Amino acid sequence: MTRRRPVYLDHQATTPLDPRVLDAMLPWLTGDFGNAASRQHAYGWVAESAVSVARETVAAALGAEPGEIVFTSGATESNNLAILGAARAARRRGDHVITSAVEHRSVLDPCRQLVAEGFEVTVLAPDVTGRIAVEAVTAALTDRTVLVSLMAAQNEIGTLNPVAEIASLCASRGVLFHTDAAQAVGKVPFDVRSGIALASLSAHKLYGPKGVGALYVRARPRVTVSPIVFGGGHERGLRSGTLNVPGIAGLGAAVRLALREREAEAVRLTALCDRLDDAIRGALSGVTLNGHRVERLPGNLSLSFAKVDGERLITSLRGLAVSSGSACTTASAEPSHVLQAIGVPHELAKATIRFGLGRFTTAAEVDLAAAEVVEAVLRLRSETASISA
């Protein structure tokens, strides 16, 4: 008898490849296998045409120009290129960078590298919902600030930042604003024309392939970025390396589909999240929502469960594929740095589940998930009470 696979509810970690995206990639994996940098023959010309179409699609989705899109291996590389590249290029003007305590590690770690290089980095504290206030950024800006990097949507708790207002503020002060938009693009309205100088995204958060992403680099006023990868001068010298043509074609298709379906999908996922939340919190006491109640990603639900051992809770949910936080740091025994930053107590942070609903999640799966969580929490609490007695 074939064992049923767990219900997949970890869409903030990664998304399944949409079959329509796979169809867009297949030609570039087989017959049209040329190198897009080969300018002397038709194989290269055809490959370059696929890259150009994807570049135009991604640019249009962001409110950008095609020449402002740099293809990378994903949001981690894009974040590194944006932060290290922009800060180093601007060092003659200043040596101060601002970020927040709830950023992804691919932002916090490059900022730590900048500290090692002599930069000063201010790490802003979020409010209890995980948002960074415009006023906090205003207070942190100095005449030495060259870069502010704040994510558009928090990957663990789903909270949306007021990036348009913060970008406008930074632009008025002549400071570059970068946002990690990997969780936001294609899910919530996003437009770089608010004053955003740099923006990162990744295909695998959008039902596209892993290993490909993009960085928006504003052309007017021009943003100067020092490359961090050398060897051939591809992507206008900002990111050397043979272009991943199938992946780039997949990214373009994924972005196009996500933008086309975004509004309807947001309504559907919000309703499913509410259904899951109501079913769990209607049956259990001592359950806390993490993140902003309204300003949050459709499809994200982060709940903390009191009086439950977190490790036992996760391992008890054999029928569900869920996580306790970011997929990039799940090897750590420590609670999520995001939950700690918003003030969630240590034991409660360890007993947190991030439910990530997605394009192929059904109401039946949500109901199954709620029932399994409720059963597991009640059983674990009962066992704990028996031991205590």
Image (spheres, helix red, strand yellow):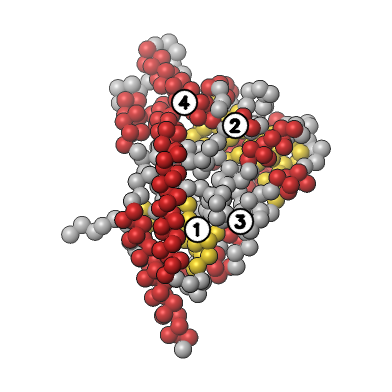
Image label count: 4
Residue 233 appears in the picture as rendered: no
Neighbor class of circle 3 (other Cα within 10 Å; few <14, some 14-19, many 20+) is many
Mark seen at residue 380: none
**Label 1: which secondary element:** strand
Q: Amino acid at mark 4?
A: Thr
Q: Amino acid at mark 3?
A: Thr
Q: Nearer the viewer, residue 24 or 329?
A: 24
Between marks 2 and 3, how big is the CA–CA gap? Answer: 24 Å
| Tag 1–tag 3 contact (CB < 8 Å) | no
CA separation in Å, label 4 and label 2: 14 Å
**Residue lying farthest to the left in this orientation:** 1
> What residue sits right under mark 4 in the picture?
57
* SS at mark 3 in the image: loop
Residue closest to the eye, 41 or 245: 245
Residue at label 3?
A: 129
Is 371 placed left or right of 158 in the picture?
A: left
Whole-Å distance between the Cαs marked 3 and 4? Answer: 33 Å
Spatial distance from mark 1 to mark 3, Cα to Cα?
11 Å
**Mark 4 / mark 1, whichever is N-terminal:** 4
Q: Viewed as shown, does residue 120 lie left or right of 346?
A: right
Which residue is the extreme one toward the bottom?
389
Per the rendering, the mark at residue 302 is 1
Q: Identify the residue shown where x is 80% and y is 38%.
A: 144
Quote the CA–CA distance across marks 4 and 1. 32 Å
User: Taking the image as drawn, is residue 348 in sight?
Assistant: yes
Identity of the residue drawn at 58% across and 59% down: 339
Q: Position of residue 249 (x, y in %)?
A: 40, 28
Label at residue 192: 2
Amino acid tagged 1: Ser
Q: Earlier in the sequence, mark 2 or mark 1?
A: 2
